[in-house]
Image: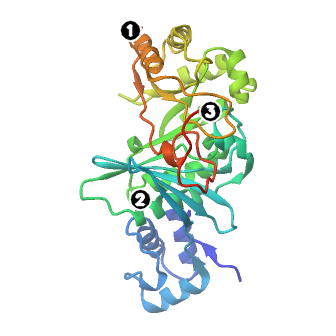
Amino acid sequence: MQKKELIGLSAQEMERLLVALGEPPYRGRQLYQALYRKRQWDLRKITPFPPALRDSLAEQVQITLPEVEKKFRSQDGTCRYLLRLADGRQIETVRMPEPGRNTICVSTQVGCPVDCKFCLTGVMGFTRNLSAGEIIGQALRVMEETRPADGQRWNVVFMGMGEPLLNFVQVMEAVKILTDPEGIGLSWTRLTLSTAGVVPGIERLGREPVRPKLAVSLNATTDELRDRIMPINRQWPLADLLRACREFPLRPREKLTFEYVLLEGVNDSPEDARRLVKLTQGIRAKVNLIGLNPGPELPFRTPPDETVLRFQQTLIQKGLTAFIRKPRGRDIFAACGQLKLMEVQTAPANS
């Protein structure tokens, strides 16, 4: 008999599981708290349970986290995890330490179907969606391996491999457990989901009672260019995407984030910056500017720092809040757009 996997189950599902085993519902709640809040993963050592129940659970259920195959450490402290799932598939997760916090970048798919032309993950193609348990398991594995100092907090960003809104149900199940005070217990303000522009998913996300902050990967200011570098634009062009962004129900003091990867000589001109300001008018938003993180098989170059700074200043002068995102882990293929299961230690310099 195949054992039932516990990681990814909600509190209600664990209650039903324990009732089916002849136990009262509160035992399911205890199991839920033990797994997610206390991170007790040895079923025979869950202290609130009598020995007979521990033995029964060990025979019928299992707790499976992704296995760490390799870790790559950057000069800036970033760590890239090459993880193996139960079926042998591989994904990547990144931990970015900063003063007072650790940010975990999780994957939501094996590979990615979106095929952005400046992203190494897109080169891989798409294999399958991850389950809620496999998404949560990445965060739990990194948390278990990292013992941050007292007072440090965890952030989780859905910005690894895959398009989160094309795996909507499983991603939102993971969000519920991540934000449940009886579960992992993170605030929604510490979760961010990045999308390439899946308009129905953005609309659906806005109706969720508990959701992460939203970041939209824009990267072009005309449909002609966005069609070329982000084929998803052919299905949901800029007008549809920006309409969904304007209608997205932001919470008090919340801003929508537009991510803009700068490609030398492609989308980094002052004219591009001015068009970006016009496109985002009427949206309570900020812009994160990202100089291309280079890699093999990518046909673009990273703009000089002065070009990125000039682009930022143009946005700011026009009243649009803009930040330059410092690349993290670029030297180990851990930065935005570089995840491709690279089993090399050091990324080559941009050429």
Q: Position of residue 57 (x, y in %)?
A: 54, 83
Mark nearer the viewer, 1 or 2: 1
Label located before the other in sequence (2 or 3):
2
Q: Which mark is residue 317?
A: 1
Snapshot quadrant of residue 319: top left
Under circle 2, the secondary element is loop
Q: CA distance from mark 1 to mark 2?
A: 41 Å
Q: Amino acid at mark 2?
A: Ile
Q: From the image, tell me which residue sits under label 2.
A: 184
At label 1, counting other C-alpha atoms closer than 10 Å, the crowd grade (few under 14, some 14-19, many 20 or more) is few
- Mark 3 residue type: Ala
Crowding near the residue tagged with mark 2, few <14, some 14–19, many ≥20 C-alpha atoms within 10 Å: many
* Mark 2 vs mark 3: in front: 3
Judged left or right of residue 348, residue 74 is left
Q: Amino acid at mark 1?
A: Gln
Which percent across, then down, holds residue 248?
53, 26
Identify the mark nearer the N-term, 1 or 2: 2
Q: Position of residue 24 (x, y in %)?
A: 48, 78
Quadrant showing the N terminus: bottom right
Task: Choose between 54 and 327: the one closer to the eye.
Answer: 327
Label 2, label 3: how many angstroms apart (C-alpha)? 27 Å
Quadrant where the C terminus is found in the figure:
top right
How far, Cα to Cα, is label 1 from label 3? 27 Å
Residue sitting at the far left: 150
x 42%, y 19%: residue:
309
Q: Is residue 345 found left or right of 186 in the rendered image?
A: right
CB contact under 8 Å: marks 1 and 2: no
Kindly identify which residue carries mark 3: 196
